[in-house]
Amino acid sequence: MKNPTQLSDSSGALAIANRPPTPMLPSGGQPLAASLFPNPVYPFFPPSPSSHQSPTRRWMSQGEQALSAEVAAYAEEVRSLRQQLAEKEHLAAVGTLAASIVHEIRNPLTTVGMWLDYCQRQNLPEPAQQRLVLAIEDGDRLQRLLDQILLYAKPQTLYRQAVDLNQLVAETLETLQHTPVARNHQLEFWPSRTPATTSADPDKLKQVLINLVTNACEAVSDGDRVHISVSSRGSDRSCLQVHNGGRPIPPDQLAKLTEPFFTTKATGTGLGLAIVQQIIDAHAGSLKLESSATAGTTVTVTLPSQR
């Protein structure tokens, strides 16, 4: 309403008048928001020229992506656990079958061994003696193989107690030094300067040490040294290492050494390191094998320290 409004009475005198309305917008037609808010204020997020989505929509998309990644991670973990469970069930079935076969073979093998012992006490001709020696050696090798198969097939039952690794290694090496496999080698022991105690089955750990030292001695020539060391790694881990300077193990073979029945030895059973891996896994430890032409071969066993 640009013009004023006027009202007159019956005599023609001015009764009511009002002023013209005052413009609400500044002169020149500038927008109200531009004059009151010279710098625009946006809720939560500034607009993105490269995105046509609202800030709330973009925030929801990021949340959905994070949730999707988390669900995918859980699904992969479940798949891995199912695969491990299936493998354990398969190994359990194979172990049960292997144990039954071992028991069936050991009985006649015992009878064969008794007959070979009887023949050994007889005055046989030289050709017969040579054949007898070969038969006894093969019988002993078969007996060791059956024992290891049975040991691998049985579940690892641990009788835990506090074990001082320095003391266990020193006592085991004192006995092992006089065995035929280690008699012509120098076993050097470097104990830990700090206590290295773990909760473990001492008989199982002795078995691990004997196996590793035996392998190290077989990998080097007579008179060569085999180093055994114990150390502490922080406050929660203890470490046992066995090192030899023999010929390096190729990487493709190194990765398979803990697989059952894989061996690089002409007379090996392929179960020694597989059993070692089983024992270490039962103790919630880790087994690491390293080999190179310059550093030789080192086997590292890491176990949780007893607090």
Image (spheres, rainbow, N blue to C red):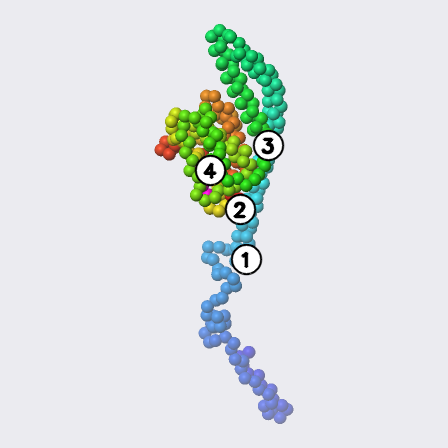
Q: Amino acid at mark 2?
A: Arg
Residue under label 2:
307
Front in this rendered view, residue 9 or 149: 149
Residue under label 3:
155
Q: Secondary structure at mark 4?
A: strand
Residue 91 position, x and y percent, is 58, 30
Q: Amino acid at mark 3?
A: Pro
Front in this rendered view, residue 174 or 102: 174
Mark 2 touching mark 4, by CB under 8 A?
no
Q: Quadrant of the N terminus?
A: bottom right
Instruction: Check the image and name the residue furthest to the left.
Output: 294
Please report whichever mark, 2 or 4, sits nearer to the chain's N-terminal start: 4
Residue occupying image coordinates x 59% and y 88%: 16
Please report whichever mark, 3 or 1, sits nearer to the chain's N-terminal start: 1
Q: Quadrant of residue 3?
A: bottom right
Q: Amino acid at mark 4?
A: Leu
Question: In the figure, is residue 157 to the left or right of 248?
Answer: right
Give neighbour class at mark 1: few <14, some 14-19, many 20+ (Cα, 10 Å).
few
Front in this rendered view, residue 226 or 149: 226
Q: Estimate the spatial distance between the alpha carbons at disc 4 and disc 1, rounded to whole Å.
A: 56 Å
Give neighbour class at mark 4: few <14, some 14-19, many 20+ (Cα, 10 Å).
many
State the extent of the magenta-drawn residues as a range: 229-233
Q: Which mark is residue 196?
A: none
Q: Secondary structure at mark 1?
A: helix
Question: In the figure, is residue 136 to the left or right of 187?
Answer: right
Residue occupying image coordinates x 46% and y 76%: 27
Q: Is residue 231 magenta?
A: yes
Residue under label 1:
56
Question: In the figure, is residue 93 to the left or right of 168?
Answer: right
Q: Estimate the spatial distance between the alpha carbons at disc 3 and disc 4, rounded to whole Å.
A: 24 Å
